[in-house]
Image (cartoon, grey):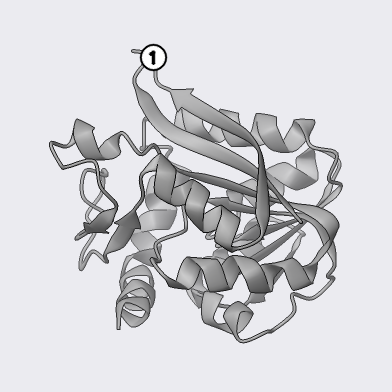
Amino acid sequence: MKENKIKTSWEINAEQWIHVMDKQEIASRKFTNEAIVSVLKASEAKKIVDIGCGEGWLTRAITEMGKSGTGIDATVSLLENAKKKGKEAYHHISYEDLVEGKLIPKAPFDAAVFNFCLYQNKELISLLKQLKNSLIFNGEIIIQTLHPLYLTQNQLPYTSQWIADSWKGLPGSFLDGHPWYARTFERWLLDFQEAGLIVNAIIEVNNQDAIPISVIFKTQVK
């Protein structure tokens, strides 16, 4: 049910999301975009798949690095916008497709990146396990997500839990927000272990006031 809610919410809000991203209205993205681009630039990976690519800004950034970027997403209107903006290959593939064993065209990849697009609880482990089939041996899975201290910053107990509205706090006129699962550091590390991933680096991203806003996990397939 939550997966359907997530898909529906993105379909409803795709146009508004494109507007907000094109206008660079999310202030924290100045720091988080720079951080994920820096990590991907420094990676030895040359062939990278951007999972949950949305309107494709990061896929295009991968191409601008001189690397090969491919994007996948479950929202058709976002993919159509991405195709208008870039020459990269974009494919309509959902997380459910990956969990069911669908391989990504042009696989295997050196690395996969998730940039603020993981909302699942138990389904995450299955997704990461199946994704390994589209990666080379010792391939990387790089994840940027909200910092776990988001919980205490919003007066919530520091325990993994469902958050009701993914759009809350963002600029723009978003409707029908979907739930997302917030994890503590401990829960992230346990899930990576269960998925068969080795954590090679944890990069915390701060804003101009030295407040943690995101974290990047660099993991590797065992």
In the foreground, 150 or 9: 150
Secondary structure under tag 1 reads: loop
Q: Is residue 50 left or right of residue 74?
A: right
Q: Residue furthest left?
A: 155
Residue 71 visible (yes or no): yes
Residue at the spot 31% in from the left edge and 77% down from the top edge: 2
Q: Residue furthest top?
A: 209
130 in relation to 163, above or below: below
Give the x, y percent position of residue 14: 39, 65
Q: Is residue 103 left or right of residue 166?
A: right
82 in relation to 159, above or below: below
Q: Quadrant of residue 179?
A: bottom left
Give the x, y percent position of residue 93: 61, 78
Q: Which residue is mark 1?
A: 208
How packed is label 1: few (under 14 Cα within 10 Å), some, or many (20 or more)? few
Residue at the spot 66% in from the left edge and 54% down from the top edge: 197
In the picture, the quarter occupied by the C terminus is bottom right
Residue at the spot 27% in from the left edge and 44% down from the top edge: 170
Residue at the spot 39% in from the left edge and 37% down from the top edge: 147
In the foreground, 210 or 130: 130
Give the x, y percent position of residue 77: 49, 72
Q: Is residue 175 left or right of residue 94?
A: left
Residue 73 visible (yes or no): no
In the picture, the quarter occupied by the N terminus is bottom left
